[in-house]
Image (cartoon, rainbow, N blue to C red):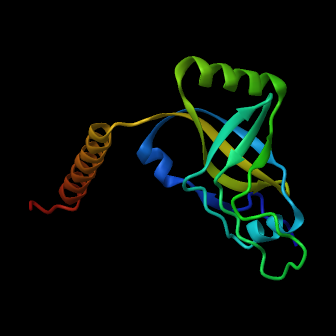
């Protein structure tokens, strides 16, 4: 039996696209304990409220919820503990420079498995103001309405 090419995404942070203007993104590995990997494979994780920080030349992921695996007996690491991200030195330096210069933040956008290893996609983000969010919602609604009108026109309806 052939293995599937791409394993499904464990968690997405859809709220990040609403709350932030997302910029450049990177794929990073994560340092996890055994039961955390099993919990992720079961599809249990939440990226909402998560962020990353550069500390002493390393990037750490904070606030990501990976619940305790139900059949595990020995792990008491905490579901929201900070986890180390694995990136190349040049990538870490570039991210740190951009965060310090521009006042950006690092947010996780998705969590998935690639070749059997847990990966997280992180992106540089700038916070949106309330009016930016309203404008984005209005633009999205306008494009939906245009698509609906085009579909009605193609189907021959005149409503």
Which quadrant is home to the N terminus?
bottom right
Query: Relative to 74, is 61 on the left or the right?
Result: left
Above or below, 13 relative to 123:
below
Q: Where residue 58 appears, x then y in whole percent?
A: 80, 33
> From the image, which quarter does the C terminus lie in?
bottom left
Position in image of residue 84 (x %, y %): 80, 45
* Vertical arrangement, residue 53 with respect to residue 146, above or below: above
How far across and down, in percent of the image, does residue 27 sit?
A: 72, 40
Going 70% across and 46% down the picture, which residue do you hit?
Answer: 61
Up/down of 5 relative to 120, above or below: below
Give the quadrant of residue 34. bottom right
Q: Name the outermost residue toward the bottom.
A: 71
Q: Choose between 152 and 121: the one closer to the eye.
A: 121
Q: Residue at horizontal 80%, vertical 65%?
A: 36
In the rendered structure, the answer to whether residue 112 lies left or right of residue 87 reads: left
Query: Which residue occupies 58% across, 17% down?
Result: 101
Which residue appears at 64% of the width and 53% of the height? 63
Nearest the viewer among 42 and 6 is 42
Q: Furthest-left residue in view?
A: 159
The image quarter containing residue 121 is top right
Q: Which of the pair 10/34 is nearer the observer?
A: 34
Labels in figure, total: 0
């Amino acid at each position: 039996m052939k293995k599937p090419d791409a394993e499904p995404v464990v968690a997405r942070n859809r709220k990040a696209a609403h709350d932030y203007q997302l910029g450049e993104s990177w794929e990073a590995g994560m340092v996890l304990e055994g039961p955390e990997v099993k919990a992720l494979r079961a599809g249990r994780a939440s990226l909402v409220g998560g962020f990353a920080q550069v500390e002493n030349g390393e990037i750490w992921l904070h606030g990501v919820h990976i619940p305790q695996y139900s059949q595990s007996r020995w792990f008491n690491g905490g579901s929201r503990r900070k986890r180390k991200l694995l990136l190349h030195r040049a990538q870490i330096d570039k991210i740190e420079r951009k965060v310090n210069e521009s006042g950006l933040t690092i947010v996780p956008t998705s969590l998935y498995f690639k070749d059997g290893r847990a990966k997280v996609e992180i992106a540089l983000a700038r916070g949106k103001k309330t009016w930016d969010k309203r404008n984005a919602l209005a633009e999205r609604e306008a494009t939906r309405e245009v698509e609906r009108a085009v579909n009605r026109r193609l189907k021959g309806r005149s409503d």
